[in-house]
Image (tube, grey):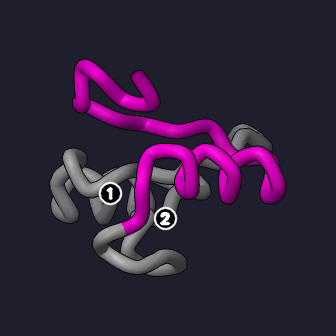
Amino acid sequence: MSSLQFIADVHISPLTVVALQQAGYNILRSTEVLPATATDIEILEFARVNNRIVLTQDLDFSH
């Protein structure tokens, strides 16, 4: 599988994250590593530091 790493924010269903993990993707949910109240900026900073791509359905993410 790809060496890409992802982090899904709270707008991505946990079922989707599990399905992607089962398909071999390196993905985790933001709530696994950050508080559920984490801001978009905190999620982006975590992704930057950990070299992960953010998956979101939040149309105004980091706006």
Which part of the image, by quadrant, shows the C terminus?
Answer: top left
The answer to which of 25 and 14 lies nearer the viewer is: 14
Q: Residue at x 52, y 57 (%)?
A: 27
- Could you classify mark 1 by the number of other residues whose Cα lies within 10 Å: few (under 14), some (14-19), or many (20 or more)? many
Identify residue for label 1: 17
Residue 42 vs residue 62: left or right?
right
Q: Which residues are magenta?
A: 38-63
The answer to which of 6 and 20 lies nearer the viewer is: 6
Q: Position of residue 43 (x, y in %)?
A: 54, 53
Give amino acid for label 1.
Val
Give amino acid for label 2.
Leu
Residue 3, compared with residue 32, is above or below; it is above
Q: Residue at x 69, y 51 (%)?
A: 45
Residue 61 picture quarter: top left
* Residue 28: image tag: 2
Among numbered discs 2 and 1, the one appearing first in the sequence: 1
**Label 2's element?**
strand
- Could you classify mark 2 by the number of other residues whose Cα lies within 10 Å: few (under 14), some (14-19), or many (20 or more)? many
Q: Position of residue 11 (x, y in %)?
A: 20, 46
Which part of the image, by quadrant, shows the N terminus?
Answer: top right
Residue 31 vs residue 19: left or right?
right
* Residue 48: image tag: none
The answer to which of 35 and 28 lies nearer the viewer is: 35
Residue 58 lies in the magenta stretch:
yes
Q: Residue at x 53, y 39 (%)?
A: 54
**Label 1's element?**
helix
Q: Position of residue 57 (x, y in %)?
A: 24, 30
Residue 7, compared with residue 32, is above or below; it is above
Disc 2 and disc 1 in contact, CB within 8 angstroms: yes
Residue 32 vs residue 42: left or right?
left
Q: Residue at x 83, y 55 (%)?
A: 49
